[in-house]
Amino acid sequence: MRVWFFTLVAICFLSYVPVERTGKVVKVVDGDTFDILDESSTTRVRLFGIDAPERGQAFNKRAKAFTDSLLSGKQVRVVVRDKDRYGRTVGDAYLSDGTHVNAEIVRAGYAWQFKKYSTDPEIARLEEIARSHHRGLWEDAQAIPPWEFRKGKR
């Protein structure tokens, strides 16, 4: 019985293939959320492991504009990690040249690493570099993380 269980677990683990969605970006909602259109439907995507300024928060419009300039009208591949409580697909997005969109937004200083969900050392490194060079939202030494901003609005 134990052998069957471990065999089944091994098969499931070894046969896991990440789910991917590809499509054209048709709308940028904010600095970390956008819609893609594939051949049959539109999917709202929330970028995994990063958190951009909220509507009404400093740098929100600039973060959205940066993400829009990076993605609007382009083909992207999204490696799906999860669905969030709002039904959005949560994942890592890549441009056709391999650019990791999540990382580029952090590198430009328009999002924090969302440490509640991500421990990615590369994203942490990019945030630290953006912060030390005062890029994007890091122009403001007192920048409030979106998760703190949301707490204050409740």
Image (cartoon, rainbow, N blue to C red):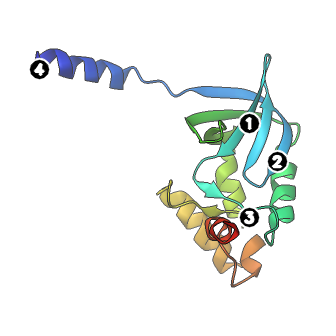
Residue 2: which numbered mark, if any? 4
Q: Residues within 10 Å of mark 2 (few under 14, many from 20)?
A: some
N-term-proximal mark, 2 vs 1: 2
Circle 4: element type: helix
Task: Look at the image and tell me in which quarter the C terminus lies.
Answer: bottom right
Amino acid, disc 2 = Val
For residue 53, the mark is 3
Judged from this view, the residue extending furthest toward the front is: 154
Alpha carbon separation for disc pair 2 and 1: 9 Å
Structural distance between the alpha carbons of marks 3 and 1:
18 Å
Where, by quadrant of the figure, is residue 85 drawn?
top right
Residue 141: x and y in percent read: 69, 85
At mark 2, the secondary structure is strand
**Label 1, residues with CA under 10 Å away: few <14, some 14-19, many ≥20:** some
Residue in front for this viewpoint, 98 or 37: 37
Residue 95 visible from this viewpoint = no
Residue pointed to by mark 1: 44
Asked if the residue at tag 1 contacts the one at tag 2, i.e. Cβ–Cβ closer than 8 Å, the answer is yes
| Res 151 visible | yes
**Residue placed at 81% from the left, 61% from the top?**
55
Please tell me which residue is depicted at 67% across the width and 27% down the height of the picture: 21
Image point (84%, 36%), residue name: 74
**Closer to us: 123 or 33:** 33
Q: Which residue is mark 2?
A: 29
Considering only order in the chain, which callout, 4 or 1, is on the residue closer to the N terminus? Answer: 4
Picture quadrant where residue 71 is located: top right
